[in-house]
């Protein structure tokens, strides 16, 4: 291995209880909200074709005009309790909230810049009431923070001159001040989700970022920090120059889901996903494919089956209301989660061979395995292949626990589970109680055989 001063400081997954709780969340909500929600991807009747939260980068609006949106921020319909209720009903166990996106507008009254809610017509803190409302619903909060800050005069894409490096030193101090401010103002926040760290200026800051990460962990023991915060000694991000993950979970699964367990390299991870193809902030047009409830349930199941969490994005409008399409998706997902969440919460990679009918999840620390069915085979029988010395004690429908299903042994370690045809074409769950005869690894099937 390459000797590194600022590479990964831990080899395997974290083993503490705070991270174990994060690992078991299964389903989360992402909230992208800020000034970009006011134009919503349109300006003077013209449509911005990029992601709505990047509209400031469009030459369709003068930068100063965008920046003066602060004077239009007055979300009269903002109701943090109703946002939290929507997330609760969906079955989200955590929420990731944009405290500051790339445009630099702070949803909390930061002491270190004027570009905050305090200097908008709304005046009040947004983050505090949101953290309290979600916590009251039993939902943990992760704070999204963009290092890149287009509003900060000290921000640089790269450091070329002496002036650049002096300016960027000031920017680094500002960044540290804001992060410590967030941790001190919102002590119940469980962790940080970083963005805006790909530019040349930041990838040179291995030592600074490493020191700051250590300082934040000391300030908030148990703090969960994503892999997109710091670069290593050679500017490598997410994984250091020895291929080891920096931070506590992989953040790179943005709008994409791993296909096999090897893709996750034994790391904790979450997948953050947009409802349209690529819109995080509120976008009026919402063109192209809008994901359906069944698609989103399948993405959730797929993520949990590979040991990750699925985090679905909501982009509230400039007035603080959540669009009907998102409310309806949350309700639809929630209807399914209310019946089937046992197959999602505190479940991990089951270590079984993937079958065409859907996804296996394994209950952490138990012999229960769930089959989340999306594709009913024309044979009507669901194939299950188990490791050696393992067999099925019982099989039942999660929604009707006392109905045992017929288990047909086909050959050593291979079975067909038979169920009667179903009236609706909604995903459903079969629960398997496995027993591992002597000589087989005890505990769950977390490690791939
Ligand atoms: C190229 C690119 C830069 C930034 C992003 C931001 N990360 C997502 C989580 C959103 O915040 C998006 O604006 C996406 C793509």
Image (spheres, rainbow, N blue to C red):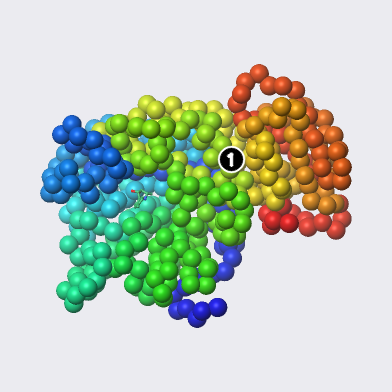
For the point 38% across and 41% down, the residue is 278
Residue 227 in the figure: left or right of residue 368:
left
Q: Quadrant of residue 384?
A: top right
Determine whether 171 is above or below 34 in the image.
below
Q: Position of residue 18 (x, y in %)?
A: 54, 56
Residue in the foreground of this view, choosing between 21 and 185: 21
Residue at image coords 54%, 35%: 297
Residue 316 in sight from this viewpoint: yes
Residue in view at x 76 percent, y 31 percent: 381
Quarter in which the C terminus is drawn: bottom right
Give residue 274's position: percent from left, percent from top: 41, 40
- In front: 367, or 292? 292
From the image, which quarter does the N terminus lie in? bottom right
Expressed as whole percent of the image width and height from the top left, the position of residue 441 reads 78, 57
Residue 306 position, x and y percent, is 60, 49
Q: Is residue 345 left or right of residue 186?
A: right
Query: Which residue is under mark 1?
Result: 301
> Can you say whether 288 is above or below 308 in the image?
above
Task: Give the left or right position of residue 146, taking residue 411 as reference.
Answer: left
122 is higher (above) or lower (below) than 243: above
Q: Nearer the viewer, residue 241 or 350?
A: 241
Residue at the extreme bottom of the image, as rendered: 3
């Amino acid at each position: 291995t390459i000797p590194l001063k600022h590479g990964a400081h831990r080899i395997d997954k974290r083993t503490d209880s705070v991270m174990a709780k994060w690992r078991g969340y299964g389903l989360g909500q992402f909230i992208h909200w800020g000034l970009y929600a006011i134009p919503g991807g349109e300006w003077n009747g013209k449509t911005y074709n990029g992601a709505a939260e990047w509209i400031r980068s469009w030459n369709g609006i003068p930068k100063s005009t965008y920046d003066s949106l602060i004077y239009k921020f007055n979300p009269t319909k903002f109701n943090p309790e109703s946002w939290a209720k929507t997330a609760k009903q969906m079955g989200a166990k955590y929420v990731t909230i944009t405290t500051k996106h790339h445009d630099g507008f702070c949803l909390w009254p930061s002491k270190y810049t004027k570009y905050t809610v305090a200097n908008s017509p709304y005046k009040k803190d947004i983050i505090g009431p949101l953290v309290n409302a979600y916590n009251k619903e039993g939902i943990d909060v992760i704070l999204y923070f963009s290092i890149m800050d287009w509003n900060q005069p000290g921000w640089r894409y790269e450091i070329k001159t002496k002036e650049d490096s002096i300016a960027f030193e000031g920017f680094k101090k500002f960044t540290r001040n804001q992060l410590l401010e967030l941790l001190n103002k919102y002590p119940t926040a469980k962790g940080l989700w970083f963005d805006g760290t790909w530019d040349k200026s930041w990838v040179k800051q291995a030592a600074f970022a490493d020191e700051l990460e250590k300082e934040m962990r000391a300030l908030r023991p148990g703090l969960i920090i994503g892999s997109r915060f710091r670069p290593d000694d050679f500017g490598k991000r997410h994984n250091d120059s020895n291929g080891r993950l920096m931070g506590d979970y992989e953040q790179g699964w943005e709008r994409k889901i791993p296909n096999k367990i090897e893709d996750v390299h034994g790391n904790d991870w979450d997948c953050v996903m947009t409802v349209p193809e690529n819109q995080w902030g509120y976008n009026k047009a919402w063109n192209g494919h809008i994901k359906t409830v069944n698609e989103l349930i399948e993405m959730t199941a797929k993520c949990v089956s590979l040991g990750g969490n699925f985090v679905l994005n909501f982009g509230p409008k400039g007035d603080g209301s959540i669009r009907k399409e998102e409310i309806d998706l949350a309700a639809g997902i929630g209807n399914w989660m209310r019946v089937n969440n046992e197959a999602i919460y505190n479940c991990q990679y089951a270590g079984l061979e993937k079958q065409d009918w859907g996804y296996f999840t394994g209950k952490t620390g138990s012999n229960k395995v769930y089959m989340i069915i999306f594709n009913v085979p024309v044979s009507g029988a669901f194939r299950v292949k188990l490791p050696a010395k393992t067999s099925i004690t019982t099989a039942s429908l999660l929604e009707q626990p006392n109905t045992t299903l017929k288990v047909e042994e086909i050959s050593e370690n291979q079975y067909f589970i038979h169920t009667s045809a179903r009236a609706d074409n909604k995903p459903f769950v079969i629960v398997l109680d496995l027993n591992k005869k002597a000589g087989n690894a005890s505990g769950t099937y977390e490690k791939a055989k």
